[in-house]
Image (cartoon, helix red, strand yellow):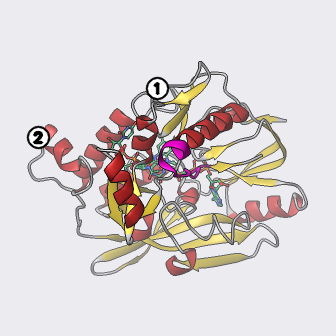
């Protein structure tokens, strides 16, 4: 029996029969073959999962390391990164190499192999803007397949690996096309303000990464101090008519135009219904960011999920919107 409490950032107590780290593809294929027929949970950094008290099977961590430059083109480099590399380290490493594109995605927890699963995004940039392809191994028969960016069908916190291909593949490497000249994205949220605050007049990509890191550290709790999985719900999309109805009733509603409708700030909705900072001694909404559910100590999966249902019910009552859970919940 293995204790997974240290392997999930919510810090939920969880046990599994076996936990193995696959250092390379051959080792992964051997583990997959050896454990055919057992329930299989693939786990990276554990920063986007709600783990059950007991997982009656094997947990495999695809821990492949390495960053390889596959091709240098006039304006871009094509890199391949092992699934087990730590995402936030990769971002800083690429910037030091003079490879640009990941700066707005600085400081997102987790491993590289999980990045395509929900098409990680922050501060106006998503993985989809740099993803070239994904190398994956079939959980069923261990064959290897390359998924092009189009085949991954990336969307807002979505990909084919959360939909029709869910639980069928283990991602072993991620290929990204990075720029050799930076193209800065400064227009999202408070990036410009933060750069000014840091007295950076002529920002480069490194400065953007540092501004994003500073902003994130002010808003989001550090999982090492307070267990959490980042945003617990997705920001909901509503059509223009619903957005306009809501605006008439709720002044201050935070809504961003998006794909023929509006994306609403779920954190604002939860805050509005009075749940920011609320909960009990075990679980609740973070006091600085209502969208982040926190384990204040001693919470189990059932406590987190009960609180999540309470939040969903309150938001549904007031706004008529059902919030969708972002992390993967295992039962
Ligand atoms: P895990 O939690 O280990 O796994 C998540 C899911 O992916 C599971 O279903 C797992 O089975 C699957 N999976 C993992 N690795 C593989 C693999 N190699 N092959 C196949 N399936 C795999 N996310 C954002 O998008 N933007 C943010 O700004 C952001 N901020 C965060 C801030 C905090 C403080 C925290 C705690 C989380 C945040 N997240 C954010 C969520 C999380 O960091 C990302 O989703 C990250 O990509 C998860 O990586 P992981 O290795 O921890 O995945
Ligand atoms: N807000 C409130 N009260 C709150 C929380 C937020 O009023 O308690 C308001 C804020 O003032 C702001 C708006 O809601 O006007 C949006 O808040 P924020 O800028 O913190 O961003 P978010 O929409 O809550 C999203 C992502 C984050 C990502 C940030 C930055 C989702 C579900 N979340 O958060 O991703 O880091 O934007 O780009 O899309 C994650 O997915 O785990 C995650 C942390």
**Looking at the rendering, in which quadrant would you find the N terminus?**
top right
Q: Residues within 10 Å of mark 2 (few under 14, many from 20)?
A: few
* Residue at x 50% of width, y 52% of height: 234
Q: Which residue is disc 1 drawn over?
A: 277
Label 2: which secondary element? loop
x 81%, y 58%: residue = 31
Count how many numbered circles sit on residues in the image. 2
Q: Residue at x 70, y 70 (%)?
A: 137
Q: Magenta part mainly helix, strand or loop?
A: loop
Left of 79 or right of it: where is 139? right
Residue 129 marker: none
Residue 218 picture location, percent across and down: 33, 33
Choose between 139 and 159: the one closer to the eye: 159
Instruction: Give how far across and how far down residue 310 sits, in percent.
Output: 61, 36
- Magenta stretch? 315-327
The answer to whether residue 293 is above or below residue 111 is above
Taking 42 as reference, is 261 left or right? left
User: How many angstroms separate mark 1 from mark 2 (CA)?
Assistant: 32 Å
**Of the pair 59 and 244, the residue shown nearer to us:** 244
Identify which residue, 308 or 137, lies in the foreground. 308
Magenta stretch: includes residue 40: no
Q: Secondary structure at mark 1?
A: loop
The correct choice, above or below, for 246 with respect to 300 in the image is below
Q: Which residue is mark 2?
A: 199
Q: Is residue 258 visible?
A: yes
Q: Is residue 74 above or below residue 189?
A: below
Q: Residues within 10 Å of mark 1 (few under 14, many from 20)?
A: some
The quadrant where residue 172 appears: bottom right
Marks 1 and 2 close (CB-CB < 8 Å) = no
Horizontal side, residue 38 vs residue 234: left or right: right
């Amino acid at each position: 029996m293995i204790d997974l409490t240290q392997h999930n950032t919510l810090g939920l107590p969880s046990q599994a029969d076996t936990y193995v780290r696959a250092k390379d593809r051959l080792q992964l294929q051997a583990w997959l073959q050896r454990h055919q027929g057992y329930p299989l949970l693939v786990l990276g950094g554990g920063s986007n999962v709600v783990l059950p008290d007991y997982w009656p099977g094997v947990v495999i961590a695809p821990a492949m390391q390495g960053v390889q430059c596959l091709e240098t083109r006039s304006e871009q480099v094509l890199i391949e990164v092992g699934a087990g590399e730590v995402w936030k380290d990769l971002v800083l490493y690429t910037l030091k190499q003079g490879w640009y594109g990941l700066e707005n995605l600085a400081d997102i927890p987790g491993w590289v192999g999980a990045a395509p699963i929900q098409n990680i995004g922050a501060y106006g940039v998503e993985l989809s803007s740099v993803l070239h392809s994904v190398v994956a191994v079939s959980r069923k028969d261990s064959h290897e397949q390359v998924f092009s960016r189009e085949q991954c069908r990336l969307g807002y916190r979505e990909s084919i690996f959360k939909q029709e291909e869910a639980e069928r593949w283990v991602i072993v490497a991620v290929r990204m096309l990075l720029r050799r000249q930076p193209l800065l994205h400064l227009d999202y949220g408070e990036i410009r303000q933060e750069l000014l605050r840091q007295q950076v007049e002529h920002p480069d990509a490194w400065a953007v990464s540092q501004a994003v890191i500073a902003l994130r550290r002010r808003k989001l709790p550090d999982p090492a101090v307070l267990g959490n999985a980042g945003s617990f719900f997705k920001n909901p999309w509503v059509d223009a008519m619903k957005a306009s109805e809501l605006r008439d009733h709720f002044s201050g509603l935070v809504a961003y135009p998006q794909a023929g409708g509006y994306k609403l700030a779920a954190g604002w909705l939860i805050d509005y219904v009075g749940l920011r900072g609320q909960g009990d001694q075990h679980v609740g909404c973070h006091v600085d960011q209502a969208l982040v559910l926190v384990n204040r100590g001693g919470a189990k999966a059932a406590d987190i999920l009960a609180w999540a249902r309470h939040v969903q019910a309150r938001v549904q009552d007031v706004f008529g919107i059902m919030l969708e859970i972002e992390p993967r919940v295992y039962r």
